[in-house]
Image: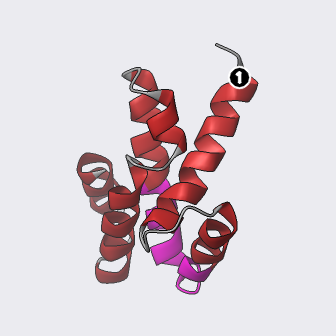
Amino acid sequence: MRWKEIIDRQWHGILYSYSQIFFARSSWYGVLLLLASFVNPVTGISGLLAVLITNIMADIFTLNPRTIREGAYGFNSAMVGMGLGSLFEMNSVFFLMLFHVS
C-alpha cells in the first residue's frame, strides 16, 4: 500500500469524523468543526488525537478503507476525546485514558 493513499485516507477520515458528529458529509464542515474544537486547545488536541488513534488502529487492523475514509470509525472517538479534554487535566494518566477509550 502506498503512503499517499494512507495519508489521504487518514486526512479525509479526520475531516469526515468531525462532520459526522452533525450527520453531515462535507469535508469543509469537518474543517470548520475541527477548527472550532480548538477554541479550547486541550479539547481540540484530545479530540484530534482520539480520531488519529482510532483511524490508525483501524488501518493497522486492516478494516475497510472506505469506512475509515468516511469517518465512520472516528466520529465517536472525536466526541469522547473532546469530552475528556474538556473535563480532565492533561497529564500522563489522561493520555493513557484517551488511548484506551479511543
Q: Is residue 48 magenta?
A: yes
Whether residue 89 is visible = no
Location of mark 1 (residue): 3
Q: How many marks?
A: 1
Quadrant for residue 57, please give it: top left
Q: Taking the image as drawn, is residue 90 in sight?
A: yes
Q: Residue 75 lies in what quarter of the image?
A: bottom left
Quarter of the image where the N terminus is located: top right
Image position, residue 19 (x, y; %): 52, 66
Amino acid at circle 1? Trp
Which segment did they paint magenta? 36-50
State the residue at coordinates (63%, 48%): 12
Q: Is residue 27 above or below residue 59?
A: below
| Element type at mark 1 | helix
Residue farthest right in this picture: 4
Image color mode: secondary structure
User: Image check: 4 left or right of 36?
Assistant: right
Residue furthest to the bottom in view is 39
x, y percentage for residue 102?
Answer: 31, 50
Please provide percent x and percent y for residue 77: 35, 57
Would you place residue 84 above or below residue 78 in this image?
below
Q: Is residue 41 shown in magenta? A: yes
